[in-house]
Image (tube, grey):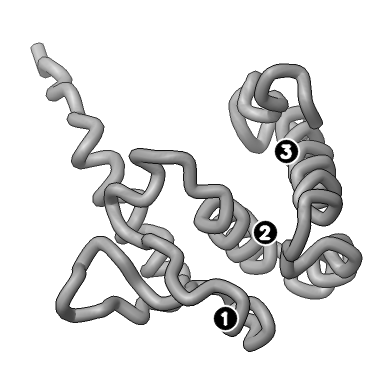
Amino acid sequence: MNARKKVSAAEIRYAFVNNVQLLGFPDTSDKDDPTATNSTNTTKSTKSRRNRIPFGPKMFAEVNQHGFNAIIYFLLIRLNPEHYKQHFDTCWPVYDSNQQRAFRKLVLVELRSFENLSQIPRGLAQSKGGKS
């Protein structure tokens, strides 16, 4: 009988970072600090706004809204660049709380549509604390 080995949280975090990089997420690692990188967003305007977005296995150990936004936007753009660039046109890059709210709502709509098409497990598209 084959016993399944339990995968640690650290292994999952490293696999996540590795897989996102394999998909083409920019790796602009600071060689002196392997847990932090320059901004990972693809637009120059966003790079000038934020000096550093932590990117690495520990990037979500604490709240990291900018990192979350960058990863979600990157993954959706990889799926369908034309559609999602147009879809997020009014709220990307995120500069203020109004854009953050709009971005979060659009992401939830997309995740719910993936759930309805059985492309992701049910329950992933939930807003935190009833906010959306």
Q: Does the CB distance between marks 1 and 2 fall below 8 Å? A: no
Q: Does the CB distance between marks 3 and 2 fall below 8 Å? A: no
Q: Where is residue 76 in the image (x, y as percent from the top left)?
A: 67, 59
Q: Which residue is drawn at 82% across and 74% down?
A: 82
Q: Residue at x 37, y 58 (%)?
A: 19
Q: Can residue 6 be seen in this view?
A: yes
Which quadrant, please, contains the N terminus? Answer: top left
- Badge 2 density bin: few <14, some 14–19, many ≥20, Cα 10 Å: some
In the picture of the structure, the residue carrying the numbered disc 1 is: 47
Instruction: Tell me the amino acid under the disc marked 2.
Output: Leu
- Position of 75 compared to 115: left or right? left
Determine whether the residue tagged by mark 1 lies in a helix, strand or loop. Answer: helix
CA distance for labels 3 and 2: 10 Å
CA distance for labels 1 and 2: 19 Å
Determine whether the residue tagged by mark 3 lies in a helix, strand or loop. Answer: helix
62 is higher (above) or lower (below) than 100: above
Compare residues 129 and 50 and report the one nearer the observer: 50
CA distance for labels 3 and 1: 26 Å
In the picture of the structure, the residue carrying the numbered disc 2 is: 76
Q: Quadrant of residue 8?
A: top left
Q: Where is residue 71 in the image (x, y as percent from the top left)?
A: 54, 58
Which numbered disc, 1 or 2, marks the residue that appears first in the sequence?
A: 1
Determine whether the residue tagged by mark 2 lies in a helix, strand or loop. Answer: helix
Instruction: Tell me the amino acid under the disc marked 1.
Output: Lys
Compare residues 77 and 36 and report the one nearer the observer: 36
Q: Position of residue 94 (x, y in %)?
A: 73, 62
86 is higher (above) or lower (below) than 100: below
- Badge 3 density bin: few <14, some 14–19, many ≥20, Cα 10 Å: many
- Position of 102 compared to 16: left or right? right
In the picture of the structure, the residue carrying the numbered disc 3 is: 111
